[in-house]
Image: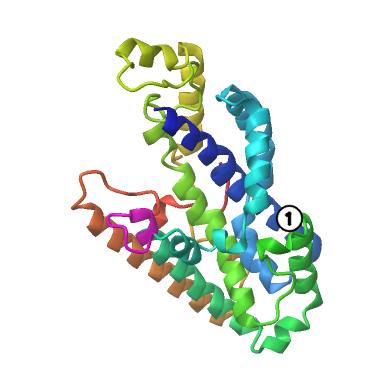
Amino acid sequence: MFIKNTVIMEQQSVHHLMNTHLLEEVFTVATLRNLPTVHPIHKLLVPHFKDTIPMNIKARTFLFDKVLELCSVGSKGLKELMKRSFSELTYSDLCLPENITSRGLDSVPNFYYRDDGLMLWAIIHSFAQAVIEHFYPSNADVQRDSELQDWISEIFTYGFLGNKESSCPTSFSSVQDLVKFITMVIFTASGQHAALNNGQFDYQTYLPNASLLLVRAPPTTKGQSTMQSVLDALPNVGDTGRFTSAAWILSAQYSDLVNTFGHLHDERFDDPILTQMMKEFQAQLSNLEETITQRNKGLPVPYTYLLPSQVENSIAI
């Protein structure tokens, strides 16, 4: 229970808030500052930035100041944790295939986040490659796009704070460099956020399983814990209600959802070639939906968080 307390604090502050919400805000602002609305990369990315900045404003005031403030180390402790983690964050950490391999998780059985995530990553990569190669037939086309180069330079300078050890690109020299980075931006806003966000109510509302707050020190001697000592360590009813409410709000599925993954690009691209690419993209997502659904029929606890129908284009909540 105490180990899970540390895990959930890191999950909420580092992996959820910092590595999806706040990083996507960096990409959003850089896009609005450097890429005009007619730029193909602006058109490709802007559906994945929908409502992200308003959501982050709410996250700073509601999630951080009202909920995470109550956690075991407080908001100051979480900010220090985020600061230390960000200093070690690398571009590879944000690219799922490299992340999985670097952590030695390629062959771990029954790891559905990996399985579904890698399939979703591949579909996004295929779509991004088709669109980008349509507008950038050669590496030279990428290299001489000054607006695009200013975009990635600003992300490196102000997003990754000029940290060369992060391996974040400072410029794009090839089409494939651009495709990989765009894939990461889209996956972070959609699949990665869904995987981190959508299961919060399922896993965090039974407080002994994952509580942000424990009010007693962990035991130091084996065999001394009792049911009463466990109950004494859990937060009071009021704080329990706050954590539960936050988890419900953040992971709720709304009946008027219009931001489903893969269904907003047609508002900006009217080229028949691009329209066909989007249809193929949506068809691949439908196939993934069916693959995951069939797999889940044989699971005692289905893994649904990366079903394309449950993933949003952007971080809107």
> Going 45% across and 25% down the picture, which residue do you hit?
244
Q: Position of residue 171 (x, y in %)?
A: 74, 73
How many labels sit on residues? 1
- In this figure, which residue is indicated by the disc labeled 1? 159
Q: Nearer the viewer, residue 208 or 122?
A: 208
| Secondary element at image label 1 | helix
* 261 up-or-down from 169: above or below: above
The x and y percentages for residue 227 are: 31, 13
| Residue at screen point 69% across, 69% down | 169
Q: Position of residue 42 (x, y in %)?
A: 69, 66
- Is 270 one of the magenta-colored residues? no
Q: Range of the magenta residues?
A: 105-115
Q: Amino acid at mark 1?
A: Gly
User: What x and y, as percent, mark residue 235?
Assistant: 47, 16
Left or right, residue 256 beside residue 172: left
Q: Is residue 243 visible?
A: yes
What residue is shown at x 53% (from left), y 34% (from top)? Answer: 9
Q: Is residue 63 above or below residue 26?
A: above
Query: Would you say the magenta stretch is mainly helix, strand or loop?
Result: loop
Residue furthest to the front: 221
Q: Mark 1: give few (<14), some (14-19) or many (20+) Cα within 10 Å.
A: many
Q: Quadrant of the C terminus?
A: top right
Is 7 situated above or below 238? below
